[in-house]
């Protein structure tokens, strides 16, 4: 092969997935990376990591996704992972009202701990369980509008709208870069622009992305 | 490679070299495998990166296997394992034809070995290997994976053996951890699927060779170069004896180069326009490659090289010149050679061929490419092979009768080729033309000079490569008469692979998708046996251990590390110790991490006040992967150690009987200074300890200097905490140490931190020192004066206990005016500062050991 530049993706976007425990964060990530549903997903005790390359307007973008533990006791620790996220997927469970009620607290954390241009995407998960619905669509839609969030109901089980949530977020981030709102080479932005030479190693990028391993 | 080439002795040569990966999962390190040959006999395999890592003799201990297990896992990848004695190396190779070629060479080398009768002396190999401890002479050195070091920068070097690990074994790998050479992986995957996005295009390749005997091009060359109806796509035209002058030989300079280039350019097929791609010349050997203009834009990576095999085996009167290029995705190599002359020298010619074959190296590639690394090879030239064992007149008669076949049976090249001594794997088309040598210049007559040379097919074209589909033409051109040789031409129908842009994009997309998936699969993964480590009830100064087992359940080696959280200064609380806190685990292996909790004088007060508890969330970070949270919990049984003086004076029951909430309340209200009237003037615990020393220790030598016994100190702790009515246990030394420990475990020293600067300044003045002590909170002042009184008493027995005021002052200076935690600066400046500080502290306390301070003392309310 004569040229190598054509293989590279041009951007790395860092995402975080947050929300109460059991809302389906890990299932959403798994559905997005593997196109499979995990019925017996154990609680996340830590921060899981997944990647996938997508294409936005003809440009290859590598998503590095951090799926955080939702349990309250880890809240203080998971806050370390917000910094440098270009996208935040905030998830609640449409069948459990409490997870919806906690959104304002998640939102506060996100606003406080990420940069102003971080794209926040609200996902009402488990839309397949229509029968046990506990949060009305328009109610959540209103909350999203009030807080300037993009909103969709999705199901990690059927896969409905999952792809869309991740892609829409990327499109919005990409748009922000093109509009000059986001400087692709500041570590805080959660976005790395790759020159033609090819992507940096995963190890490199993750360690510079990670807020707290400056050890 | 170059460094290896420098090491080669004249009788050693590189038979084949191949780029491979030492891979585990997706961690790979690039290596070259090089097959060496000595004296055309002994073979060896070098494993090299920048230098040579291993030099392995290919002898009876050498084994080689295509690893099928791994193969099935990842279809398309070729894994080979090479075992030498007990050591095994595992390599991944691209499933391309070069890999096959290399493996064939390796098999051939092993076959050669198996036919040898003796083992062979391999001492010549020593010079290649930098790591002598793992070569043949010293295989006893065996390291196992557990000794592997994890130095800085994610770089792990590990050496292990079959014996140590039992199964998946790697020997001498330098792993650049988590270095995803993403591009190279994609390239590799794309090369596997080349068939899917390329199509075949037929082209015509014209090969010409002519020994021009030093003549200038005085005639038109069209008869030779333009013999077809359709213009060929590629011309590769070689000359020998372009210039026989001394200048050409000595300085490699000649005007003939331009003359012939012009003559050739003029006579190329008029049906197409050509672009000169490359011209290479060594003395009289010249090779020019032209490519048809439209095709020329698809030519990449053009390179050339020359090899002299003439005088002393080096000079350019004989040898070869070569040009290589990539046309679309097909690699082509053209070699023009002039081999040794004289009828009897056929073996020399064979050797020349091998020298050229092994020494031509196209640099600018990593590793440099050699002739055999090409899809299609066209080898032309004055190969100089003659006709032997046949009478001259008979030869001429047979030629005239057109019975070339009979003569060819006596052609040295035909014979040597058939025997496999030269041009192995090459093909030559049938010869239906008169021998091209030797003619009287200007005629078609055989040499009529005194030497009367026998006719011979000196000038030949051979070829190798699946893509060379058909030899359309192979003939000499008698009408060109300026030389004693006739030119030869050959025309080939060859296939090249052309990339289909649309299909390429599609395959590329698929490959990216597949890799993307795999990337998640090959992320580092571990399981820990427990994410909630719960300790039993902890007590002051009693350590407890638990083991956390981290198992690598993923497919790649894992580097783990406990990392700091957000704004913490350390990766764990100060009562916790993690050993090791970072490490490296191979797939399928485990690492035991020891967690030790230990509440000592530094952290006891925070436990008592409720400021801290046995609770910590550890972040176990996998380099390049996820993080795991490990929760450490336990309960702590509070002790008087760690209580403030203010709290202790208010405790009129044993600590064990005090409710937790009450203790926290006392600790948090200690600054208010409101002491109830039931308070003691000094804590009962201090009183008990001092009283004991007063009664049993006044005459004890080395009191406070001699350490106590840890077990006794624990008994004393229990005695104090439970308010036991038994006699105080332990030796006076243990009691003395307990007293110090009690004073050291408080949150603030007896003289609070904020008074330290004033105390240090006042260290030269007893009057000022007294004023400062008088301003202490009441209970601290009481304890201070109480202890100083006791110390004075102690010093009054100096004759028996041999204590002196200076020593005691230094010791208690450090206790009464204890430094805040972690204020010690390791730098030299910090150290000398601490020393002057220590001296001043001692001076401060000294005043109270040698002066009467009874005016400061309030009446003491002794407990008990
Ligand atoms: N029916 C249905 N069940 C879902 C869906 N998504 C997740 N679940 C189930 O919900 C449970 C919790 O899902 P997880 O993905 O583990 O939730 P989480 O947000 O990652 O939880 P933590 O890791 O504890 O923060 C699992 O049993 C899933 O099978 C969904 O879309 N539909
Ligand atoms: Mg989860």
Image: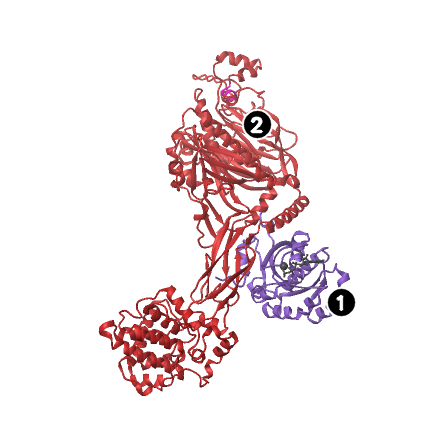
Chain colours: A purple, B red
Question: Relative to the observer, which residue lies in front, B605 or B353?
Answer: B605
Question: Relative to the observer, which residue lies in front, B395 or B175?
Answer: B175
The residue that appears at 66% across and 41% down in the rendered structure is B197
Judging from the image, mark 1 belongs to the subunit labelled A
| In the depicted structure, whether residue B99 falls above or below residue B834 | above
Residue B259 visible within the image = no
Judging from the image, mark 2 belongs to the subunit labelled B
CB under 8 Å between callouts 1 and 2? no
Q: Position of residue B71 (x, y in %)?
A: 58, 39
Secondary structure mainly formed by the magenta segment? helix
Identify the image quadrant of residue B492. top right
Q: Position of residue B338 (x, y in %)?
A: 47, 28
Single out the residue that lies furthest toward the front.
B726
Residue B789 visible within the image = yes
What residue is disc 2 on?
Answer: B489
Magenta residues (range): B411-415
Single out the residue that lies furthest toward the bottom.
B855
B413 within the magenta span: yes
| In the depicted structure, whether residue B369 falls above or below residue B313 | below
Image-based side of A192 in relation to B242, left or right: right
The disc at residue B58 is none
Where the N terminus of chain B falls, by quadrant? Answer: top left
What residue is disc 1 on?
Answer: A136
Identify the image quadrant of residue A147. bottom right
């Amino acid at each position: 092969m004569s040229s190598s530049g054509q293989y590279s993706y041009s951007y790395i976007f860092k995402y975080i997935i947050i929300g109460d425990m059991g809302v389906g964060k890990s299932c959403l990530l798994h559905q997005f990376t593997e196109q499979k549903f995990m019925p017996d997903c154990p609680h996340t005790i830590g921060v899981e990591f997944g990647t996938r390359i997508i294409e936005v307007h003809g440009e290859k973008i590598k998503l590095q996704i951090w799926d955080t533990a939702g349990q309250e006791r880890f809240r203080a620790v998971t806050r370390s992972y917000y910094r440098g996220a270009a996208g935040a997927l905030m998830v609640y469970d449409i069948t459990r009202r409490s997870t919806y009620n906690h959104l304002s607290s998640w939102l506060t954390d996100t606003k406080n701990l990420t940069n102003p241009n971080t794209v926040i995407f609200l996902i009402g998960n488990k839309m397949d369980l229509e029968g046990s619905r506990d949060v009305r669509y328009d109610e959540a839609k209103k909350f999203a509008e009030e807080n300037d969030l993009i909103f969709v109901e999705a199901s990690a089980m059927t896969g409905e709208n999952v792809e869309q949530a991740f892609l829409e977020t990327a499109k919005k981030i990409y748009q922000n870069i093109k509009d000059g709102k986001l400087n692709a080479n500041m570590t805080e932005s959660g976005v790395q622009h790759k020159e033609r030479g090819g992507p940096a190693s995963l190890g490199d990028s993750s360690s510079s992305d990670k807020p707290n391993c400056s050890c | 490679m170059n460094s290896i080439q420098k090491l080669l002795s004249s009788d050693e040569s590189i038979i084949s070299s191949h780029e491979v990966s030492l891979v585990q999962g997706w961690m790979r390190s690039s290596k070259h495998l090089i097959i060496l040959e000595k004296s055309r006999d002994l073979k060896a395999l070098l494993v090299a990166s920048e230098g040579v890592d291993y030099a392995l003799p290919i002898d009876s201990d050498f084994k080689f296997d295509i690893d099928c297990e791994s193969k099935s896992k990842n279809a398309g990848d070729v894994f080979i394992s090479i075992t030498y004695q007990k050591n095994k190396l595992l390599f991944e190779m691209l499933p391309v034809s070069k890999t096959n070629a290399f493996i064939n060479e390796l098999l051939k080398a092993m076959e050669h070995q198996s036919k040898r009768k003796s083992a062979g002396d391999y001492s010549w190999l020593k010079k290649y290997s930098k790591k002598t401890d793992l070569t043949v002479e010293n295989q006893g050195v065996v390291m196992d994976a557990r000794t592997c070091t994890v130095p800085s920068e994610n770089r792990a070097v590990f050496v292990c053996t079959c014996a140590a690990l039992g199964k998946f074994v790697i020997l001498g790998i330098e792993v650049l951890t988590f270095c995803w050479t993403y591009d190279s992986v994609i390239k590799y995957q794309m090369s596997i699927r080349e068939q899917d996005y390329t199509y075949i295009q037929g082209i015509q390749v014209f090969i010409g060779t002519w020994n021009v005997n030093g003549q200038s091009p005085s005639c038109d060359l069209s008869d030779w170069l333009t013999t077809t109806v359709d213009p060929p796509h590629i011309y590769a035209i070689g000359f020998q004896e372009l210039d026989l002058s001394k200048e050409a030989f000595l300085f490699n300079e000649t005007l003939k180069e331009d003359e012939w280039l012009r003559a050739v350019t003029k006579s190329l097929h008029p049906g197409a326009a050509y672009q000169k791609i490359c011209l290479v010349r060594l003395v009289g050997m010249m090779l020019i490659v032209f490519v048809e203009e439209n095709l020329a834009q698809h030519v990449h990576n053009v390179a050339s090289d020359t090899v002299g095999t003439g005088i002393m085996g080096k000079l350019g009167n004989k040898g070869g010149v070569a040009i290589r290029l990539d046309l679309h995705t097909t690699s082509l190599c053209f070699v023009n050679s002039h081999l040794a002359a004289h009828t009897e020298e056929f073996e020399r010619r064979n050797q020349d061929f091998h020298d050229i074959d092994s020494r031509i190296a196209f640099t600018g590639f990593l590793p440099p490419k050699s002739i055999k690394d090409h899809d299609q090879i066209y080898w032309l030239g004055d190969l100089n092979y003659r006709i032997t064992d046949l009478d001259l007149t008979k030869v001429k008669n047979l030629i005239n009768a057109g019975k070339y076949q009979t003569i060819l049976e006596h052609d040295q090249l035909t014979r040597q080729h058939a025997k496999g001594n030269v041009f192995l794997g090459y093909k030559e088309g049938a010869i239906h033309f008169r021998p091209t040598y030797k003619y009287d210049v200007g005629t078609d007559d055989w040499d009529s000079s005194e030497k009367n040379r026998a006719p011979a097919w000196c000038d030949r074209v051979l070829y190798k490569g699946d893509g060379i589909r058909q030899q359309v033409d192979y003939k000499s051109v008698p009408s060109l008469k300026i030389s004693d040789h006739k030119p030869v031409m050959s025309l080939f129908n060859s296939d090249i692979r052309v990339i289909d842009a649309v299909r390429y994009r599609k395959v590329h997309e698929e490959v990216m998708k597949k890799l993307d998936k795999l990337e998640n699969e090959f992320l580092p993964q571990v399981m820990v046996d427990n994410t909630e480590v719960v300790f039993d009830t902890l007590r002051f100064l009693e350590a407890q251990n638990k083991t956390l087992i981290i198992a690598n359940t993923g497919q790649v080696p894992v580097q783990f590390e406990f990392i700091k959280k957000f704004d913490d200064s350390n990766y764990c609380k100060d009562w916790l110790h993690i050993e090791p806190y970072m490490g490296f685990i191979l797939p399928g292996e485990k690492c035991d991490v020891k967690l030790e909790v230990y509440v000592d004088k530094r952290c006891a007060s925070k436990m008592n006040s409720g400021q801290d508890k046995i609770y910590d969330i550890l972040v176990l970070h996998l380099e390049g992967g996820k993080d795991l949270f490990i929760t450490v919990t336990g309960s702590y049984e509070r002790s008087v150690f760690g209580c403030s003086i203010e709290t202790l004076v208010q405790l009129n029951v044993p600590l064990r009987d005090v409710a937790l909430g009450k203790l926290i309340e006392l600790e948090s209200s200690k600054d208010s200074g409101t002491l109830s009237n039931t308070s003691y003037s000094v804590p009962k615990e201090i009183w008990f300890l001092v009283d004991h020393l007063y009664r049993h220790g006044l005459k004890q030598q080395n009191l406070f200097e001699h350490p106590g016994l840890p077990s006794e100190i624990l008994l004393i702790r229990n005695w104090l905490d439970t308010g036991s009515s038994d006699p105080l246990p332990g030796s006076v030394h243990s009691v003395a140490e307990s007293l110090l420990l009690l004073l050291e475990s408080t949150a603030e020293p007896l003289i609070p931190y904020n008074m330290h600067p004033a105390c240090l300044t006042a260290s030269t003045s007893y009057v000022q020192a007294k004023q400062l002590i008088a301003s202490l909170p009441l209970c601290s002042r009481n304890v201070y004066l109480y202890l100083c009184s006791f110390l004075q008493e102690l010093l009054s027995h100096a004759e028996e206990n041999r204590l002196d005021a200076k020593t005691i002052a230094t010791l208690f200076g450090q206790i009464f005016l204890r430094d805040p935690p972690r204020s010690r600066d390791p730098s030299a400046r910090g150290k000398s500062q601490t020393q002057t500080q220590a001296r001043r502290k001692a001076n401060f306390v000294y005043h109270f050991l040698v002066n009467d301070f009874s005016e400061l003392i309030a009446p003491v309310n002794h407990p008990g």
